[in-house]
Amino acid sequence: MSLLHRRSDTRPRLWRVMLAVLGPGLVVMLADTDAGSVITAAQSGAQWGYRLLLLQVVLIPVLYIVQELTVRLGVATGEGHGQLIKRRFGRGLAWLSVATLTLSCLGALLTELSGMAGVGLLFGVPRWITMAILLGGLIVMVWSASYTGVERVALAVGAFEFAFLLVALRTHQALGPLIDHSLHIPLHDPGYLYLAAANVGAVIMPWMVFYQQSAVVDKGLGVEHLAMARIDTAVGAVLTQLIMMSVLIATAATIGRSNPHAPLDTVQQIAGALTPFLGQQTGRLLFALGMSGAAIVATIVVSLTAARGVGEVMGFKHSLEHHPREAPWFYGIYTALLVLGGVVVASDINLVMLGVAMEVMNAILLPLVLGFLYLLARRALSGPLRLQGPYAAFVLGTIVLTAGFGLYAAVRGIALG
């Protein structure tokens, strides 16, 4: 029997329930700081110093607001995001939503696997060997583990991302000049706007909405667990942005200071930004740990999310709680996506440019994704959980500003770049 459903009047029960509830928010937020996000943050610091740092801070509450709505929908309806869109708006709009999800997941998967290929190249390991080892391990893990087992692995691997915090602390940046520099924002520059759009897309991603709602359902969380699930989401939102800021600060303090506006063309160059503070071997090792944690946890999340999304709309079983014999399509789609991504990444592609481009694509998709989320929070929820009153107006304003800025920055950056 799940810890969520055990009855006990003893004091330790609170801790057991808390530990059982925590997870979906932390996992999705650690996945949010994925390989593409790390690359985008590094490119931001290298080309614009600290001028994109303030945007990372502003996006913390935006990220929480968006993901908290998915928690509400999950605990109140017991349905995944695609399934809920299908029931409320029909199969056609559900397919549109899942098509958006699949495009975002494929783009993210390519950046995650590219990040891991770059880590392998740091140590002289060919791309195809890295892909074979990584994908083989992930396929075996998902086919043989429950949701709880996969979540624990994701949290353990994702913890390596905190290596980036250590790097930022070792830069010993004075707070005054850092804040002063971050307030000089060149909104007239198309190059800046393009990276600003990439940063928005790197933080608010379509697949995060689908994943957390499905994870809440898979974990069996109910309305009584909402308060702890919100804490889980809030802590994750702060941690993921701290990691993004750490990468930006590290590259701004090195490449951004010595060679402003210099683009990063390889993952090895990003790793090289850490060596002035930590030494070549230590810097390379910490970067490899951080990037691996970011890429692996996100690979797990995006591949499962795509398989779940398709399953929700098509109606086949789509949960890790089902054995592969019970849900062959779910596990088959998951495996096919990984193999396809591995084959593409094993070819010779520019990993850094791909990562930034995928985040810009996410920014372009935001109006559709956040629009569906807002409408569901208004129509699928009832009572105190329903999005209403002044807070509904505030959330709508936040969504319009975020999606609007991301779309504007992306289009203008591409058009004028």
Image (spheres, helix red, strand yellow):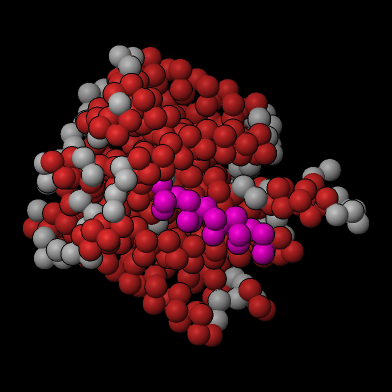
Rendered view: 380 above or below 167: below
Report the residue at 67% width, 63% height from top.
226
Q: Residue furthest right?
A: 9
* Quadrant of the rendered image containing residue 151: top right
Q: Which residues are magenta?
A: 226-243
* Quadrant of the rendered image containing residue 148: top right
Magenta-highlighted stretch: main secondary structure? helix
Is 376 left, or right, of 191 in this rendering? Answer: right
Q: Residue furthest left?
A: 416
Q: Nearer the viewer, residue 97 or 153?
A: 153
Q: Nearer the viewer, residue 228 or 319?
A: 228
Residue 129 seen: yes
Report the residue at 46% width, 43% height from top.
31
Indicate the position of residue 34 as horizontal and vertical percent values: 40, 41
Indicate the position of residue 405 as horizontal and vertical percent values: 27, 67
Q: Nearer the viewer, residue 127 or 364?
A: 127
Residue 117 seen: no
Indicate the position of residue 129 as horizontal and vertical percent values: 38, 14
Indicate the position of residue 414 as horizontal and vertical percent values: 14, 54
